Structure formats: structure tokens, C-alpha cells
Amino acid sequence: MTDKVIGVLGGMGPEATIAFYSRLVAHTPAGRDQDHLRVIIDSNPGIPDRTAAILGQGESPVPTLAKGIDGLRGAGADFIAIPCVSAHAFIDQLRQGARLPILSILDVVAEAVREHPRRIQRVGLLGTTGTVRAGMFQRRLAEAGLEVLVPDAADQARVQASIYAVKAGAPEAVRRQLTIELRSIAMRLVSSGAEAIVLGCTEIPLVFGQADVPVPVFDSLLWLALAAVRAAGREPIGLESPDPGRNP
């Protein structure tokens, strides 16, 4: 059976798109260049800010996103992956006009948490203020039987500032401080009862991960990459890690 072609609608931001592709390559079974999957990436940093749109402070990104999907289809993509959580606030609108299937980062992360062997019941969510306010991740996690904790207003402002700092290309020294800040916020959620942390923004995995907290961490970029490999017709590799945020 011929592998399906992955279309990546990226650029939100560019570094998260790179990280997604890196995870995609790392988990694709391949022994040589020719064994890898075909991936078509449209990295368009000109897509209007999703959080601003959700909060009613900016233009809708839907027309630009829809145009990108059409372009990927024309280039030969069989389905679409969008490595940006906030963009999923508009996924229903995009699916109405799209002539290709669109993977949902919300679905794949929710299923990963639900199927985790620890039988997690309560998670802490770190995401953009737009994602938190829109509530789409909370609703999808609730559908999977999970209770969701979010940071208080002050901590949420710090999470949002950290995300924009990564998008702005913060240097390594600043990133180390962002990691410390996010670790403190995550641990406050853990202290409030969170049994796992969901990285509900694709910039957060660039500065925060499993090594930073003692509970399972669910990297949205990783789980979207695994879903894309499967949707393309392969079984992902490299899941033997003892990382408690991964399912073997």
C-alpha cells in the first residue's frame, strides 16, 4: 500500500513547525532517505494571530488557513496536520470547506491521556490565553472523562508571555528562565491535584518537557506527529522510552 502524503500547515510559529517535523522524522520507521514519508510543509508566519482572533482583538485566521489547506491539497497532500493548538479553535470552520481530512491535535492528545496506563483523571493545561478562553481543549479532555485544571489569572499571563517570548526567538539564557517559570506554574497545578500536564501550545515543548516535573507530560507536538505517521500508513517507532508521558 502506498503511503499517504502529509500536508503540514505551519508557521504558527516557524520553530514549532520545525520541532513537529523533527518528531515526525524521529518516529517514522526508515532505514534510508527513501524510506521516509513524503511531507509537504507550508510554513506561513503571516497567518493572523489566533489568540488575538479568539479574544476578539484581531482578524480571523480562517481565510488564510483555508487557503493554505487548498494549496497543500494542490501540491499533493492527502491529509492535513496543523502544529498549532490555538488554530484548532477554528477547526470546525476549516473542515467545512476543506477537501482533505484534518487531524485534530485535541483528539490525539485527549486519547493519549485517556489511554495512559496510570488511569489519569485530572490534568493541568498549559496553553495560550486564547486556547484557555476558547475552552476547546477543556471540552475535548472532558469528553475523554478528564477533569482539567488551568492556571490562575496571574499564572496564565505568565504562560502567555512565555509563549510569545519563544515566538520572538528568545535566546538560550532567557529560555532557561522560561523553563523555570513554567515549571513553577506546572507544579502549582500539580499541587492543586493535576496528575499530568498537557502542553496545550506547540511553543511550550520547546522550553518545557518531561524532565521538568514528576508527573506525565503530554507533548502536543509529539502526539500529533505520531498520529500523522499512523495516518500516512506507518506504525511509529521510538516509543520505548520510560518517559511517563508516552505510551509504548
Image: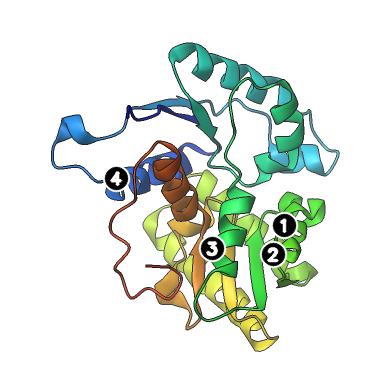
Tell me if 8 is positioned left or right of 120 in this view: left
Residue of label 1:
140
Classify mark 2: helix, strand or loop.
loop
Give the distance between the C-alpha atoms of the residues marked 4 and 2, in whole angstroms: 27 Å
User: Looking at the picture, how far across and down is residue 18, in whole percent?
Assistant: 39, 40
Label 1 crowd (10 A; few <14 / some 14-19 / many >=20):
some
Classify mark 3: helix, strand or loop.
helix
Give the distance between the C-alpha atoms of the residues marked 1 and 2, in whole angstroms: 7 Å
Give the distance between the C-alpha atoms of the residues marked 2 and 3, in whole angstroms: 10 Å
Compare marks 4 and 3 and give the one earlier in the sequence.
Answer: 4
Q: Are marks 4 and 3 in contact (CB under 8 Å)?
A: no
- Which residue occupies 51% across, 65% down? 218
Query: What is the quadrant of residue 104 in the picture?
Result: top right
Amino acid carrying mark 3 in the image:
Ala
**Residue 15 got which mark?**
none
Classify mark 1: helix, strand or loop.
helix
Residue of label 4:
28
Residue of label 3:
112
Compare marks 1 and 3 and give the one earlier in the sequence.
Answer: 3
For the question of whether residue 90 can be seen, the reply is yes
Against 56, residue 119 (above or below) is: below
- Which residue occupies 75% across, 69% down? 154
